Amino acid sequence: MGRLSVHIETFGCQMNVADSERAATRLRKGGFEISDSADSADVILLNTCSIREKAEQKVFNRVGEIKSGRLGKHPLVGVMGCVAQLEGEAIFKTSPSVRLVIGTGATDRISNLLEKAVGGERRVIDIAERKASEDFQISSVERHSKFIAFVPIIEGCNKFCTYCIVPFSRGRERSRVAYDIIEEVRRLREEGFNEVQLIGQNVNSYRPKVESGLEAYGGATPFSKLLRAVASTGMPRIKFTTSFPRDFHPDIVKAIDEHENLCNWVHLPVQSGNDRVLKVMRRGHKVDDYLARIDSIKNARRKISLTSDIIVGFPGETPAEFEDTLRLVQESRFHGLYIFKYSQRRGTPAAKLSDTVSEEDKSRRFLALEKLQMSIQREIYQSYIGEEVNVLVEGLSARSSEDLTGHTTCNKVINFRAEPGLIGEIVKVRVTEAKTHSLFGEV
Protein backbone atom coordinates (compact mmCIF):
# COMPACT_ATOMS: atom_id res chain seq x y z
CA MET A 1 0.00 0.00 0.00
CA GLY A 2 1.38 3.42 -0.98
CA ARG A 3 1.43 6.54 1.11
CA LEU A 4 -1.98 7.76 2.18
CA SER A 5 -2.98 11.13 0.70
CA VAL A 6 -4.41 13.89 2.91
CA HIS A 7 -6.41 16.90 1.73
CA ILE A 8 -6.81 19.84 4.14
CA GLU A 9 -9.62 22.36 3.71
CA THR A 10 -9.20 25.58 5.69
CA PHE A 11 -12.01 27.79 6.98
CA GLY A 12 -11.52 31.12 8.75
CA CYS A 13 -8.66 33.43 9.62
CA GLN A 14 -4.92 33.64 8.98
CA MET A 15 -4.27 31.70 12.19
CA ASN A 16 -6.19 28.78 10.69
CA VAL A 17 -4.18 29.06 7.47
CA ALA A 18 -0.96 28.94 9.51
CA ASP A 19 -2.28 25.92 11.45
CA SER A 20 -3.04 24.12 8.19
CA GLU A 21 0.46 24.86 6.93
CA ARG A 22 1.92 23.46 10.14
CA ALA A 23 -0.35 20.40 9.98
CA ALA A 24 0.74 19.71 6.39
CA THR A 25 4.39 20.05 7.45
CA ARG A 26 3.92 17.48 10.24
CA LEU A 27 1.91 15.09 8.05
CA ARG A 28 4.44 15.06 5.21
CA LYS A 29 7.21 14.50 7.74
CA GLY A 30 5.14 11.63 9.16
CA GLY A 31 5.02 9.86 5.80
CA PHE A 32 1.69 11.10 4.43
CA GLU A 33 1.19 12.70 1.03
CA ILE A 34 -0.50 16.12 0.85
CA SER A 35 -3.15 16.28 -1.88
CA ASP A 36 -4.76 19.29 -3.57
CA SER A 37 -7.82 17.24 -4.47
CA ALA A 38 -10.72 16.33 -2.19
CA ASP A 39 -12.08 14.01 -4.88
CA SER A 40 -9.28 11.46 -4.66
CA ALA A 41 -7.68 11.94 -1.21
CA ASP A 42 -7.74 9.06 1.28
CA VAL A 43 -8.17 11.52 4.17
CA ILE A 44 -10.00 14.86 4.29
CA LEU A 45 -9.31 17.17 7.22
CA LEU A 46 -11.50 20.23 7.79
CA ASN A 47 -9.67 22.97 9.67
CA THR A 48 -12.53 24.90 11.17
CA CYS A 49 -13.60 28.36 12.32
CA SER A 50 -16.17 29.03 15.05
CA ILE A 51 -16.18 32.83 15.14
CA ARG A 52 -19.78 32.87 13.88
CA GLU A 53 -22.55 30.28 13.94
CA LYS A 54 -22.78 30.22 10.13
CA ALA A 55 -19.07 29.38 9.88
CA GLU A 56 -19.57 26.46 12.26
CA GLN A 57 -22.63 25.17 10.40
CA LYS A 58 -20.73 25.35 7.12
CA VAL A 59 -18.34 22.71 8.44
CA PHE A 60 -21.07 20.21 9.30
CA ASN A 61 -22.68 20.82 5.91
CA ARG A 62 -19.33 20.06 4.30
CA VAL A 63 -19.05 16.79 6.24
CA GLY A 64 -22.44 15.79 4.80
CA GLU A 65 -21.29 16.69 1.28
CA ILE A 66 -18.17 14.53 1.65
CA LYS A 67 -20.22 11.58 2.91
CA SER A 68 -22.64 11.70 -0.02
CA GLY A 69 -20.40 13.04 -2.73
CA ARG A 70 -18.07 10.20 -3.58
CA LEU A 71 -18.85 6.85 -5.17
CA GLY A 72 -17.03 3.79 -3.89
CA LYS A 73 -14.64 4.03 -0.95
CA HIS A 74 -15.34 6.99 1.33
CA PRO A 75 -12.41 9.02 2.69
CA LEU A 76 -11.53 9.14 6.36
CA VAL A 77 -12.88 12.48 7.63
CA GLY A 78 -11.40 14.54 10.45
CA VAL A 79 -12.35 17.87 12.01
CA MET A 80 -9.62 20.09 13.42
CA GLY A 81 -9.36 23.68 14.67
CA CYS A 82 -11.78 25.81 16.68
CA VAL A 83 -14.96 23.77 16.19
CA ALA A 84 -13.06 20.65 17.18
CA GLN A 85 -11.79 22.36 20.33
CA LEU A 86 -15.24 23.60 21.35
CA GLU A 87 -17.39 20.62 20.43
CA GLY A 88 -14.99 17.78 21.21
CA GLU A 89 -16.71 14.39 21.57
CA ALA A 90 -20.05 15.90 20.52
CA ILE A 91 -18.84 16.00 16.91
CA PHE A 92 -18.92 12.20 16.75
CA LYS A 93 -22.61 12.29 17.66
CA THR A 94 -23.49 15.21 15.35
CA SER A 95 -21.54 13.72 12.42
CA PRO A 96 -21.02 9.95 12.89
CA SER A 97 -18.87 9.78 9.73
CA VAL A 98 -16.15 11.88 11.43
CA ARG A 99 -13.35 9.65 12.72
CA LEU A 100 -10.85 12.21 13.99
CA VAL A 101 -11.19 15.33 16.18
CA ILE A 102 -8.08 17.51 16.60
CA GLY A 103 -8.19 20.63 18.80
CA THR A 104 -6.31 23.89 18.30
CA GLY A 105 -3.47 22.78 20.58
CA ALA A 106 -2.97 19.36 18.96
CA THR A 107 -1.76 20.36 15.49
CA ASP A 108 1.80 19.18 16.14
CA ARG A 109 0.52 15.72 17.17
CA ILE A 110 -1.54 15.26 14.03
CA SER A 111 0.55 12.50 12.40
CA ASN A 112 0.28 10.20 15.42
CA LEU A 113 -3.45 10.88 15.72
CA LEU A 114 -4.06 10.11 12.05
CA GLU A 115 -2.03 6.90 12.30
CA LYS A 116 -4.35 5.75 15.10
CA ALA A 117 -7.41 6.41 12.97
CA VAL A 118 -5.90 4.72 9.92
CA GLY A 119 -4.90 1.82 12.16
CA GLY A 120 -8.52 1.11 13.00
CA GLU A 121 -9.47 3.23 16.00
CA ARG A 122 -13.04 4.30 15.34
CA ARG A 123 -12.91 7.61 17.21
CA VAL A 124 -9.66 9.47 17.82
CA ILE A 125 -9.71 12.76 19.73
CA ASP A 126 -7.10 15.17 21.15
CA ILE A 127 -8.22 18.55 22.50
CA ALA A 128 -5.34 18.94 24.98
CA GLU A 129 -3.14 22.04 25.04
CA ARG A 130 -0.01 22.49 23.00
CA LYS A 131 3.11 21.18 24.72
CA ALA A 132 5.93 23.61 25.45
CA SER A 133 8.37 21.45 23.45
CA GLU A 134 6.29 21.71 20.26
CA ASP A 135 7.31 24.35 17.74
CA PHE A 136 5.81 26.54 15.03
CA GLN A 137 8.12 25.52 12.20
CA ILE A 138 6.51 25.35 8.76
CA SER A 139 8.11 23.97 5.62
CA SER A 140 8.26 26.51 2.79
CA VAL A 141 6.67 23.84 0.57
CA GLU A 142 3.48 24.01 2.62
CA ARG A 143 3.15 27.82 2.68
CA HIS A 144 -0.03 29.20 1.09
CA SER A 145 2.11 31.55 -1.00
CA LYS A 146 5.64 31.50 -2.38
CA PHE A 147 6.06 35.18 -1.56
CA ILE A 148 4.00 35.90 1.59
CA ALA A 149 4.34 34.01 4.88
CA PHE A 150 2.14 34.10 7.97
CA VAL A 151 4.21 34.10 11.17
CA PRO A 152 2.19 33.51 14.37
CA ILE A 153 3.62 35.48 17.30
CA ILE A 154 0.85 34.99 19.88
CA GLU A 155 -1.98 32.51 20.33
CA GLY A 156 -5.18 32.77 22.30
CA CYS A 157 -6.90 35.70 23.98
CA ASN A 158 -7.28 37.03 27.53
CA LYS A 159 -9.78 39.77 26.71
CA PHE A 160 -13.07 37.87 27.07
CA CYS A 161 -15.23 40.25 25.06
CA THR A 162 -18.77 39.13 25.86
CA TYR A 163 -19.67 38.19 22.25
CA CYS A 164 -16.47 36.31 21.41
CA ILE A 165 -15.78 32.58 21.49
CA VAL A 166 -12.01 32.84 20.82
CA PRO A 167 -10.81 32.59 24.47
CA PHE A 168 -12.68 29.29 24.68
CA SER A 169 -11.58 27.91 21.31
CA ARG A 170 -7.97 29.17 21.37
CA GLY A 171 -7.29 29.40 25.10
CA ARG A 172 -5.29 32.04 26.96
CA GLU A 173 -2.64 34.24 25.40
CA ARG A 174 0.69 32.51 24.83
CA SER A 175 3.49 34.52 23.22
CA ARG A 176 6.31 32.93 21.25
CA VAL A 177 9.92 33.57 22.20
CA ALA A 178 11.18 36.57 20.24
CA TYR A 179 14.37 34.82 19.13
CA ASP A 180 12.36 32.08 17.41
CA ILE A 181 10.22 34.65 15.57
CA ILE A 182 13.23 36.66 14.41
CA GLU A 183 15.06 33.53 13.23
CA GLU A 184 11.97 32.35 11.33
CA VAL A 185 11.73 35.69 9.52
CA ARG A 186 15.45 35.52 8.65
CA ARG A 187 14.99 32.01 7.22
CA LEU A 188 12.00 33.16 5.19
CA ARG A 189 14.04 36.01 3.75
CA GLU A 190 16.80 33.57 2.77
CA GLU A 191 14.18 31.37 1.11
CA GLY A 192 13.05 34.29 -1.06
CA PHE A 193 9.89 35.49 0.67
CA ASN A 194 9.22 39.18 0.23
CA GLU A 195 6.55 39.70 2.90
CA VAL A 196 5.73 38.35 6.34
CA GLN A 197 2.54 38.97 8.26
CA LEU A 198 2.89 38.75 12.03
CA ILE A 199 -0.42 37.27 13.15
CA GLY A 200 -2.36 36.54 16.32
CA GLN A 201 -5.74 37.18 17.87
CA ASN A 202 -4.22 40.33 19.45
CA VAL A 203 -0.69 40.89 18.17
CA ASN A 204 0.03 44.01 20.22
CA SER A 205 -0.78 42.07 23.40
CA TYR A 206 2.49 40.22 22.74
CA ARG A 207 4.19 39.54 26.10
CA PRO A 208 6.84 36.78 26.02
CA LYS A 209 7.92 35.27 29.32
CA VAL A 210 11.53 35.93 28.31
CA GLU A 211 12.33 38.77 25.90
CA SER A 212 15.06 36.72 24.27
CA GLY A 213 16.24 38.54 21.16
CA LEU A 214 14.68 41.90 22.05
CA GLU A 215 17.36 43.21 24.39
CA ALA A 216 19.09 45.24 21.68
CA TYR A 217 15.95 46.99 20.47
CA GLY A 218 14.28 50.07 21.90
CA GLY A 219 10.57 50.36 22.32
CA ALA A 220 7.90 51.10 24.90
CA THR A 221 6.32 47.63 24.73
CA PRO A 222 7.54 44.13 23.83
CA PHE A 223 5.49 44.32 20.61
CA SER A 224 7.05 47.59 19.43
CA LYS A 225 10.48 46.10 20.25
CA LEU A 226 9.57 43.00 18.22
CA LEU A 227 8.51 45.16 15.26
CA ARG A 228 11.90 46.87 15.27
CA ALA A 229 13.72 43.54 15.59
CA VAL A 230 11.81 42.00 12.68
CA ALA A 231 12.39 45.15 10.62
CA SER A 232 16.14 44.74 11.17
CA THR A 233 16.10 41.34 9.39
CA GLY A 234 15.81 43.12 6.04
CA MET A 235 12.50 41.47 5.11
CA PRO A 236 11.17 43.89 2.46
CA ARG A 237 7.59 44.03 3.76
CA ILE A 238 6.21 43.39 7.26
CA LYS A 239 2.52 43.55 8.16
CA PHE A 240 0.75 42.67 11.39
CA THR A 241 -2.82 41.83 12.34
CA THR A 242 -4.97 41.98 14.43
CA SER A 243 -4.38 44.82 16.93
CA PHE A 244 -6.41 45.35 20.10
CA PRO A 245 -7.27 49.03 20.84
CA ARG A 246 -6.52 48.87 24.57
CA ASP A 247 -2.99 47.59 23.88
CA PHE A 248 -2.27 49.83 20.91
CA HIS A 249 0.62 52.02 22.07
CA PRO A 250 1.68 55.16 20.11
CA ASP A 251 5.16 53.66 19.92
CA ILE A 252 3.81 51.24 17.30
CA VAL A 253 3.15 54.22 15.04
CA LYS A 254 6.61 55.55 15.82
CA ALA A 255 8.15 52.23 14.77
CA ILE A 256 6.22 52.32 11.47
CA ASP A 257 7.53 55.84 10.84
CA GLU A 258 11.10 54.74 11.59
CA HIS A 259 11.18 51.61 9.40
CA GLU A 260 10.08 51.75 5.77
CA ASN A 261 9.64 47.97 5.62
CA LEU A 262 6.99 48.09 8.38
CA CYS A 263 3.96 48.46 6.13
CA ASN A 264 1.73 51.49 6.52
CA TRP A 265 -1.47 49.64 7.44
CA VAL A 266 -3.16 49.13 10.82
CA HIS A 267 -6.25 47.00 11.46
CA LEU A 268 -7.79 48.20 14.72
CA PRO A 269 -11.28 46.77 15.44
CA VAL A 270 -13.53 49.19 17.33
CA GLN A 271 -16.79 47.11 17.24
CA SER A 272 -19.08 49.99 18.31
CA GLY A 273 -19.15 53.78 18.51
CA ASN A 274 -21.12 53.93 21.76
CA ASP A 275 -19.59 53.77 25.24
CA ARG A 276 -22.47 51.85 26.85
CA VAL A 277 -22.39 49.18 24.15
CA LEU A 278 -18.59 48.95 24.38
CA LYS A 279 -18.91 48.43 28.14
CA VAL A 280 -21.47 45.63 27.72
CA MET A 281 -19.21 44.13 25.05
CA ARG A 282 -16.41 44.33 27.64
CA ARG A 283 -14.01 45.84 25.13
CA GLY A 284 -11.99 47.72 27.74
CA HIS A 285 -11.92 51.04 25.89
CA LYS A 286 -14.20 54.02 25.37
CA VAL A 287 -14.85 55.96 22.19
CA ASP A 288 -12.48 58.76 23.22
CA ASP A 289 -9.73 56.21 23.94
CA TYR A 290 -10.15 54.79 20.47
CA LEU A 291 -10.19 58.19 18.77
CA ALA A 292 -6.98 59.13 20.60
CA ARG A 293 -5.31 56.11 19.05
CA ILE A 294 -6.72 57.07 15.66
CA ASP A 295 -5.18 60.53 16.07
CA SER A 296 -1.74 59.01 16.65
CA ILE A 297 -2.15 57.04 13.40
CA LYS A 298 -3.41 60.05 11.41
CA ASN A 299 -0.58 62.25 12.74
CA ALA A 300 2.11 59.82 11.61
CA ARG A 301 4.75 60.98 9.16
CA ARG A 302 3.65 58.28 6.72
CA LYS A 303 0.14 57.92 5.30
CA ILE A 304 -1.19 54.91 7.23
CA SER A 305 -4.20 53.00 5.99
CA LEU A 306 -6.68 52.25 8.80
CA THR A 307 -9.23 49.41 8.75
CA SER A 308 -11.62 48.20 11.41
CA ASP A 309 -14.44 45.81 12.43
CA ILE A 310 -17.92 46.77 13.64
CA ILE A 311 -20.79 44.68 15.00
CA VAL A 312 -24.29 46.06 14.40
CA GLY A 313 -27.36 45.00 16.35
CA PHE A 314 -25.59 43.94 19.55
CA PRO A 315 -28.19 43.02 22.21
CA GLY A 316 -29.74 46.20 23.60
CA GLU A 317 -28.24 48.53 20.97
CA THR A 318 -30.72 51.39 20.48
CA PRO A 319 -31.19 53.42 17.29
CA ALA A 320 -29.47 56.37 19.02
CA GLU A 321 -26.49 54.19 19.98
CA PHE A 322 -26.21 52.99 16.40
CA GLU A 323 -26.15 56.66 15.31
CA ASP A 324 -23.08 57.06 17.56
CA THR A 325 -21.41 54.31 15.54
CA LEU A 326 -22.20 56.13 12.30
CA ARG A 327 -20.63 59.29 13.75
CA LEU A 328 -17.48 57.40 14.77
CA VAL A 329 -17.13 55.94 11.27
CA GLN A 330 -17.63 59.38 9.74
CA GLU A 331 -14.89 60.82 11.96
CA SER A 332 -12.44 57.91 11.67
CA ARG A 333 -12.64 57.61 7.86
CA PHE A 334 -11.60 53.99 7.64
CA HIS A 335 -9.93 52.78 4.44
CA GLY A 336 -11.84 49.53 4.86
CA LEU A 337 -14.46 48.20 7.27
CA TYR A 338 -15.66 44.69 8.05
CA ILE A 339 -19.30 44.90 9.17
CA PHE A 340 -21.00 42.03 10.99
CA LYS A 341 -24.56 41.55 12.12
CA TYR A 342 -24.50 40.29 15.70
CA SER A 343 -25.00 36.54 15.92
CA GLN A 344 -25.29 34.73 19.20
CA ARG A 345 -22.48 32.32 20.04
CA ARG A 346 -23.41 29.60 22.49
CA GLY A 347 -21.19 29.66 25.57
CA THR A 348 -20.39 33.39 25.49
CA PRO A 349 -21.67 35.85 28.14
CA ALA A 350 -23.57 37.80 25.46
CA ALA A 351 -25.62 34.68 24.70
CA LYS A 352 -27.40 35.26 28.03
CA LEU A 353 -28.49 38.76 26.99
CA SER A 354 -31.87 39.35 25.44
CA ASP A 355 -31.35 39.80 21.70
CA THR A 356 -33.63 42.83 21.44
CA VAL A 357 -32.66 43.92 17.93
CA SER A 358 -34.72 42.25 15.21
CA GLU A 359 -33.10 40.70 12.14
CA GLU A 360 -34.80 43.37 10.04
CA ASP A 361 -33.24 46.14 12.15
CA LYS A 362 -29.84 44.45 12.02
CA SER A 363 -30.09 44.35 8.22
CA ARG A 364 -31.17 48.00 8.04
CA ARG A 365 -28.27 49.08 10.25
CA PHE A 366 -25.85 46.95 8.26
CA LEU A 367 -26.94 48.59 5.01
CA ALA A 368 -26.88 52.11 6.47
CA LEU A 369 -23.35 51.64 7.79
CA GLU A 370 -22.22 50.00 4.56
CA LYS A 371 -23.60 52.93 2.53
CA LEU A 372 -21.73 55.44 4.68
CA GLN A 373 -18.50 53.44 4.54
CA MET A 374 -18.70 53.04 0.75
CA SER A 375 -19.03 56.81 0.30
CA ILE A 376 -15.98 57.40 2.53
CA GLN A 377 -14.04 54.60 0.89
CA ARG A 378 -14.69 55.91 -2.64
CA GLU A 379 -13.24 59.29 -1.66
CA ILE A 380 -10.18 57.71 -0.04
CA TYR A 381 -9.48 55.43 -3.01
CA GLN A 382 -9.92 58.33 -5.44
CA SER A 383 -7.25 60.24 -3.49
CA TYR A 384 -4.68 57.61 -4.54
CA ILE A 385 -4.99 58.46 -8.25
CA GLY A 386 -1.65 59.78 -9.45
CA GLU A 387 0.28 58.32 -6.51
CA GLU A 388 3.07 55.78 -6.87
CA VAL A 389 2.65 52.72 -4.65
CA ASN A 390 4.88 49.73 -3.94
CA VAL A 391 3.17 46.48 -4.89
CA LEU A 392 4.05 42.85 -4.23
CA VAL A 393 2.89 41.07 -7.39
CA GLU A 394 0.93 38.01 -6.30
CA GLY A 395 -0.47 36.56 -9.52
CA LEU A 396 -2.82 36.98 -12.44
CA SER A 397 -5.79 39.26 -11.93
CA ALA A 398 -9.25 37.71 -11.63
CA ARG A 399 -10.61 40.46 -13.89
CA SER A 400 -8.30 39.82 -16.86
CA SER A 401 -5.68 37.25 -17.84
CA GLU A 402 -3.61 40.12 -19.27
CA ASP A 403 -3.41 41.90 -15.90
CA LEU A 404 -1.50 41.14 -12.74
CA THR A 405 -2.66 41.77 -9.19
CA GLY A 406 -1.10 42.40 -5.82
CA HIS A 407 -1.36 44.38 -2.60
CA THR A 408 0.14 47.74 -1.81
CA THR A 409 2.05 48.29 1.42
CA CYS A 410 -1.18 49.88 2.73
CA ASN A 411 -2.95 46.58 1.96
CA LYS A 412 -5.04 47.70 -0.99
CA VAL A 413 -5.67 45.43 -3.96
CA ILE A 414 -4.32 46.86 -7.21
CA ASN A 415 -4.49 45.47 -10.74
CA PHE A 416 -2.21 46.54 -13.59
CA ARG A 417 -1.09 45.49 -17.07
CA ALA A 418 2.29 43.70 -16.96
CA GLU A 419 4.09 40.51 -17.93
CA PRO A 420 3.73 37.39 -15.71
CA GLY A 421 7.49 37.40 -15.17
CA LEU A 422 6.97 40.05 -12.50
CA ILE A 423 4.98 37.68 -10.24
CA GLY A 424 6.74 37.51 -6.88
CA GLU A 425 8.54 40.82 -7.38
CA ILE A 426 7.98 44.18 -5.70
CA VAL A 427 7.28 46.89 -8.27
CA LYS A 428 6.30 50.55 -8.35
CA VAL A 429 2.86 51.16 -9.81
CA ARG A 430 1.29 54.53 -10.57
CA VAL A 431 -2.43 54.56 -9.72
CA THR A 432 -4.56 55.60 -12.71
CA GLU A 433 -8.04 54.48 -11.65
CA ALA A 434 -9.90 53.83 -8.40
CA LYS A 435 -12.90 51.67 -7.61
CA THR A 436 -14.61 51.17 -4.27
CA HIS A 437 -12.56 48.14 -3.24
CA SER A 438 -9.54 48.19 -5.56
CA LEU A 439 -7.15 50.31 -7.58
CA PHE A 440 -5.87 50.08 -11.16
CA GLY A 441 -2.53 51.35 -12.35
CA GLU A 442 0.51 51.05 -14.59
CA VAL A 443 4.05 49.89 -13.82
Image (cartoon, grey):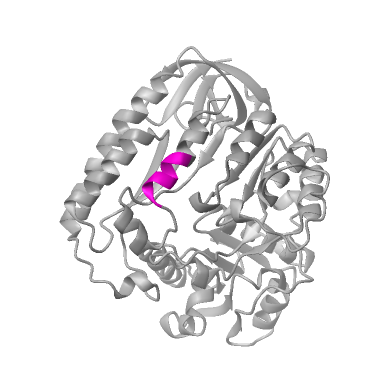
Instruction: In the rendered view, tell whether residue 232 sits above or below residue 341.
Output: above
Q: For this view, does 72 lie left or right of residue 287?
A: right
Residue 310 in percent (x, y) is at 36, 49
Residue 75 in percent (x, y) is at 56, 72
Segment tinted magenta in the rendering: 286-292
- Residue 291 sits inside the magenta stretch: yes
Residue 334 in percent (x, y) is at 40, 35
In terms of image quadrants, where is residue 385?
A: top left
Residue nearest the viewer, comparing 149 with 364: 364
**Residue at the far top in the pictured view:** 386
Residue nearest the viewer, comparing 400 with 219: 219
Residue 402 visible in the picture = no
Residue 426 visible in the picture = yes
Residue nearest the viewer, comparing 316 with 60: 316
Q: For this view, does 287 lie left or right of residue 262?
A: left
In terms of image quadrants, where is residue 118?
A: bottom right
Q: Which quadrant is home to the N terminus?
A: bottom right
- Residue 396 sits inside the magenta stretch: no
The residue at the point 59 percent across, 15 percent down is 443
Residue 408 in percent (x, y) is at 56, 28
Most common secondary structure along the magenta stretch: helix
